Amino acid sequence: MIVGEQKPISEIKEIIAPYKKILILGCGTCVKTCFAGGEDEVAVLASALRLAFKKDGKEIEIEEFTIERQCEDEFIQESAPAISRNDGVLSLACGAGVQALARRFAKSPVLPGVNTTFIGVLEKQGVFTEECSGCGNCRLDIFGGICPVTRCAKKLLNGPCGGSQNGQCEVDPETDCAWQMIIERLGILGQMDNLRIYVPPKNWQTSLSGGPRKLVREDHMI
Amino acid sequence: MNDNFTPKITLFHCINTVSEIGGFSLTGRDNFELQTVKLPCSSMVKDVFLLRAFEAGSDAVIVLVCPEGQCRYVEGNIRAKKRVAWVRNLLDEIGLGGRRLSLSNISAGDNVAASQIIQNVLKDLADLGPNPAV
């Protein structure tokens, strides 16, 4: 899932200050799961902003609405009436959702309310960790299901740097050493021979470093 | 406290804490308005309810929960505590003041303690004044 964090309220106040009528539009998928932009978060933010603006003696009307996903037109179109009623939209979706809205509603200012951070998982209740960088060339088959591109601070592909202490990374002691985890996992899987596989320097063309990517599936196009 | 200021307090309480609202006895100053919201468990107190109480004109919000370790739903009071802490920070950020929101642990049926808590909040409101967002 995509993980994001709601922007600080002071920043959001500044972003929406020029507008008299704002729609806060939530998204019911990834950002709901990480408590950044679902229906509940929309309600809390709207209430907090109304209180904040009233306290400052400023007038603002805030409408609340949430759709299933802001990255698909099928759902985005449900928000059309609400968007047309307001001067601007504060989207609590990830960056993809904000841009999808902006593309569909070109005449309405679409403002970001969330900082999109990473592709990750819910490691345990309340804790989300980054797992995938979207490098475009997945070799988790040889790394025992643990990604050194994302989880190794040095992005090493052929073994540990030797600087870890007690299983923690020398760059950041709060971070588990990815290679320690890879080796432990390969041991469990009986795949220690994978460590003998030479992984050449990564070709980053398939990642964002190679420019924005596009997937075209002609078999799904009419 | 300004004599023209009639504090409005919203009190969210778990039904296992205080059951008889009429049982509060507050000596001294009693010209305030108290609205109570019963909850089956204090964990049902959502962030937005607390904020909407302030939007509706409350000057202070109190949340009464069961003592730690005595929640009949095990951790409901812990969840309520964390949510109240979150909303207090939010109130500080928007300039309303987190002090307007408080949470207290109270044993079942201890109306004396509940009355004391309300008295303490009234004293705080003498300092804080009315809700600036009303």
Image (spheres, coloured by chain):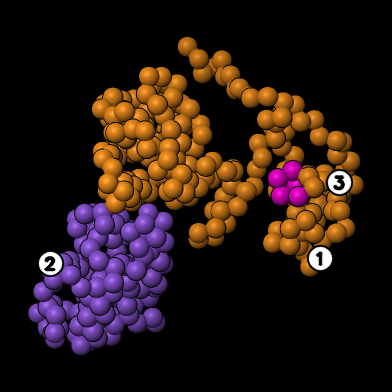
Q: Amino acid at mark 3?
A: Asn
Q: Residue at x 49, y 37 (%)?
A: A94
What residue is disc 2 on? Answer: B4
Q: Which chain is purple?
A: B
Image side of residue A155 versus residue B25, left or right: right
Q: Amino acid at mark 2?
A: Asn
Image side of residue A77 versus residue A195, left or right: left
Q: Amino acid at mark 1?
A: Gln
Secondary structure at numbered mark 2:
loop
Secondary structure at numbered mark 3:
loop
Within 10 Å of disc 1 (Cα), the crowding (few <14, some 14-19, many 20+) is few
Indicate which label's residue lies in the foreground, 3 or 1. Answer: 1
Secondary structure at numbered mark 1:
loop
Determine whether label 2 and label 3 are within 8 Å by CB. Answer: no
What residue is disc 3 on? Answer: A158
Circle 1 marks a residue in which chain? Answer: A
**x, y percentage for residue A171?**
78, 56
What residue is disc 1 on? Answer: A165
**Considering only vertical position in the picture, is A71 above or below A4?**
above
Q: Residue at x 37, y 28 (%)?
A: A76
Which span of residues is magenta-colored? A147-153
